[in-house]
Image (cartoon, grey):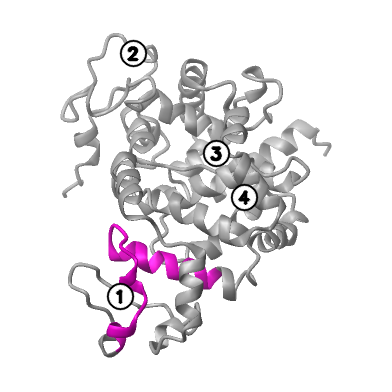
């Protein structure tokens, strides 16, 4: 039996979608693609790549120079934007500063007695709590360097030391070389998902790092890299960060329900068949070159950002809790995707099913 190339490709894509845990219903994908494509037309910034690169020239210099202290400081600033608004996080750092590479390096060079600070692997279970000034090794806290950093909460203090120890003990004090090695180890598979996982999976174990903030930080880092680092840029384009705006959009529009993928916001967004996989498969159906010829054909980060920008108050401010009563179907007659949207009531969709 002769099988044409298009049939083979369809079978490969079908197997990939099932591996993601997604519904095989073609109508669900058609609905999502049609709706999200319209959102990209309305809210997708055509200068997305140029803007990221222009705003991060100093980061690119740090990558070129393998400047580990500068990269650590940049990452810590980015990882501080979790749990609160950007305005609150930025204001606190402006007033109180942040933990820098050189401060942590100096603190650990003084050989603190706490066994948790001996290595990255030992640090697990530190348990430092800023308000109560407690931890899992109370006999050592009087001489512990973590409380000397006036960060917004104790979780960030733990993140700073966990990240430092990861870079020192796992990445050999050179995160640029480590990233290159991780991408090279998976490059032979020609699978973007595996290459992305080679970076994200180890970093997930850095204390206090959420998938959302990690994906956002890595996306900027990789896209801002020198263009000669092709694997970096390619994987940066594939990074998808799911916040509540993007998740709620997928709920309200009926995309999650149609994929039989309803779930609460959080870690489930990053599991097989969750929000990330849905945005990924939809992005593969949208040729981003129609928005800018220099874009890659499949551009998941652009698609996710367009959804976020369509919803965000400082974007187009259309699909969010300020505009929509979460207890009822959306009644915004000015929304330009209204005719395609299922207008699912958010609270009703999130309500647990009882038998």
> How many numbered discs?
4
Q: Is residue 270 visible?
A: no
Give the Cα distance between marks 4 and 2.
33 Å
Which disc, if any, is residue 335?
A: 2
Q: Earlier in the sequence, mark 1 or mark 4?
A: 1
Q: Are marks 4 and 3 in contact (CB under 8 Å)?
A: yes
Q: Nearer the viewer, mark 1 or mark 4?
A: 1
Characterize the magenta stretch by its predominant secondary structure: helix
The residue under label 1 is: 127
Q: Are marks 4 and 2 in contact (CB under 8 Å)?
A: no
Q: Are marks 1 and 4 in contact (CB under 8 Å)?
A: no
Density class for disc 4 (Cα within 10 Å; few <14, some 14-19, many ≥20) is: some
The residue under label 4 is: 193
Magenta region, residue range = 140-166
Q: Earlier in the sequence, mark 1 or mark 3?
A: 1
Q: Earlier in the sequence, mark 4 or mark 3?
A: 4
Give the Cα distance between marks 3 and 2.
24 Å
Give the Cα distance between marks 4 and 3.
10 Å
The residue under label 3 is: 280
Give the Cα distance between marks 2 and 1.
46 Å
Depth order, front residue of 5/345 = 345
Q: Earlier in the sequence, mark 3 or mark 2?
A: 3
| Left or right: 94 as drawn, with respect to 289 | left
Determine whether the residue tagged by mark 2 lies in a helix, strand or loop: loop
| Left or right: 237 as drawn, with respect to 25 | right
* Whether residue 253 is situated above or below residue 20 in the rendered picture: above
Q: Which residue in the rendered view is the most extreme toward the top?
A: 334
Determine whether the residue tagged by mark 3 lies in a helix, strand or loop: helix
């Amino acid at each position: 039996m002769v099988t044409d190339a298009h049939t083979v490709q369809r079978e490969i894509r079908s197997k990939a979608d099932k591996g993601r845990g997604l519904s095989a219903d073609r109508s669900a994908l058609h609905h999502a693609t049609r709706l999200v494509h319209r959102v990209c037309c309305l809210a997708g910034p055509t200068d997305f790549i140029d803007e990221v690169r222009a705003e991060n020239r100093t980061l690119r210099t740090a990558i070129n120079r393998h400047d580990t202290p500068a990269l650590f400081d940049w990452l810590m600033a980015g990882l501080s934007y979790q749990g609160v608004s950007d305005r609150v996080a930025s204001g606190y750092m402006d007033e109180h500063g942040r933990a820098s590479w050189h401060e942590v390096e100096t603190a650990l060079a003084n050989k603190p007695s706490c066994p948790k600070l001996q290595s990255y692997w030992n640090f697990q279970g530190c348990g430092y709590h800023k308000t109560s000034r407690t931890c899992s090794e109370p006999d050592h806290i009087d001489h512990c360097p973590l409380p000397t950093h006036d960060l917004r909460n104790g979780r960030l203090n733990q993140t700073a030391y966990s990240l430092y120890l990861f870079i020192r003990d796992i990445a050999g004090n050179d995160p640029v070389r480590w990233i290159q090695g991780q991408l090279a180890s998976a490059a032979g598979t020609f699978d973007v998902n595996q290459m992305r996982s080679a970076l994200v999976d180890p970093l997930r174990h850095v204390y206090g790092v959420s998938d959302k903030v990690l994906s956002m930080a890595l996306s900027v880092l990789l896209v801002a890299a020198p263009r000669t680092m092709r694997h970096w840029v390619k994987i940066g384009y594939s990074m998808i960060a799911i916040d509540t705006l993007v998740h709620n959009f997928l709920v309200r529009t009926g995309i999650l329900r149609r994929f039989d993928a309803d779930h609460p916001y959080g870690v489930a967004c990053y599991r097989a068949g969750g929000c990330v996989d849905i945005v990924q498969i939809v992005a593969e159906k949208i040729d981003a070159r129609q928005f800018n010829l220099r874009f890659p054909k499949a551009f998941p980060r652009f698609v996710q950002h367009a959804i976020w920008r369509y919803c965000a108050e400082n974007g187009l401010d259309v699909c969010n809790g300020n505009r929509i009563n979460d207890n009822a179907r959306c009644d915004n007659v000015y929304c330009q995707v209204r005719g395609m949207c299922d207008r699912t009531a958010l609270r009703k969709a999130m309500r647990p099913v009882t038998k």
